[in-house]
Amino acid sequence: MPLSQKMGWTEHTHERRGHPTNTTILTSDALGPAIRALREGQVVAFPTETVYGLGADGLNDAACRRIFVAKGRPSDNPLILHVLGPEDLEGLVAELPVAAQRLIAAFWPGPLTVVVPATEKVPLSVRAGLDTVAVRAPSHPVARRLIAGLGSPIAAPSANLSGRPSPTTASAVYEDMRGRIPFIVDGGSAEVGLESTVVDCTTQPVTLLRAGGIGRGRLCDVVGEVVIATANSPVRSPGMKYRHYAPKSPLIWVQSTDDAFVRRILPDIVSAHRRWALIAPDVMKGLQASWFYGLGSDDVSAAHRLFDAMRTMDQHNPDAIVVIWESQGGLGLAISNRLEKASGRRVMPE
Ligand code: TXA
Ligand code: MG
């Protein structure tokens, strides 16, 4: 019996360019094989508190290039370097602007990524040829044990195939990455559920490149003003120009949880669809959809569940997916951004 079977691991073989790769899911109490694979320059998926990451030795250019291959990511979209704390940045960042220092002091370890000037020591593949680097200290204990075990920063994007929702569970990673990477470390379901907030600290005031786990209000409390990047901003993230996840079925976002409004417009929205899926607050379970996925009752639970909800509902291949959600402050901007990118149509009260 193979060891993996004895240990209760899952294995899958997938022929790719004639080279089969077994993908093994490791439990988080046995990180040895994952650390050895990282040392050998291989790509390993691992849990963080935001979403799962697709990691490689962040100082090894050849290893980091393998991330782009596994993910199908365009090579001009840079990666985040994951470190244990600001002390790990020495030699990697050319300068730590005051705003970055303050944000790091306030939110690390946690779901905040800062973009700062890089040194030549950061591999070109990690920064996609830019002279800046995105850095973040994750709080997830498994991510931290991997970084410590490797003894180097881990470069990692989210562990989805390019264009798919970020994975929040090991099985979602497996769905996208089987046969493409040797190991997935299972750390349970990611707590935040949405990616980190990305802040460009090379501008004054700083620029919010991606809304995420830390709300804009909390950033403003620390650095005063925060400008939001748009498609036309002078600074923007390379990632902003790429298509983001949209499910196979048309997604209609009802941006109101007002009961009377929902009951009035829903029949019209779903009349054309025989099999439709509903993603909505738990209390709307009674609405007659073919499939229902409850987002809970607040933004924290909605953020935690949204990507899993979209992946799960997409698997049913419904004629349409209706999402009923209205966010307030905090994580609200991050949730709304993801829904905007995934939806073809948005309905809200006048
Ligand atoms: O929560 C997260 O941030 C997760 C976990 C694994 O840490 N990672 C993640 O990585 O979401 P990724 O690659 O999917 O998103 C990183 C974003 C991309 O939009 C990328 O363009 C941007 O950060 N980025 C990375 N380096 C940058 C840089 N030097 N300048 C501007 N944007 C950068
Ligand atoms: Mg991503």
Image: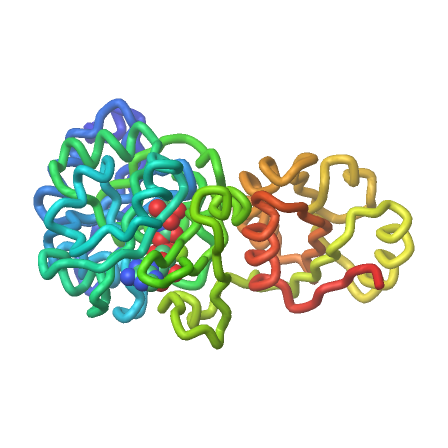
Closest to the observer: 124 or 163?
124
Query: x and y percent of residue 254 in the render?
Result: 75, 57
Establish if 254 lies above or below 7: below
> According to the image, what is the colour scheme of the structure?
rainbow
Q: Is residue 52 left or right of residue 231?
A: left
Q: Residue at x 35, y 42 (%)?
A: 102
Residue 207 placement, left or right of 62: right
Q: Nearer the viewer, residue 271 or 82?
A: 82
The foreground one among 25 and 142 is: 142
Q: x%, y% of residue 114? A: 33, 51
Residue occupying image coordinates x 56% and y 42%? 303
Q: Is residue 325 depicted above or below 24 in this figure?
A: below
Question: Is 158 situated left or right of 131 in this image?
Answer: right
Taking the image as drawn, is residue 72 in sight? no
| Residue 23 coordinates in the image, percent (x, y) | 26, 44
Residue drawn at x 42%, y 41% as measured from the top left: 50
Left or right, residue 275 beside residue 217: right
User: Which quadrant holds the N terminus?
Assistant: top left
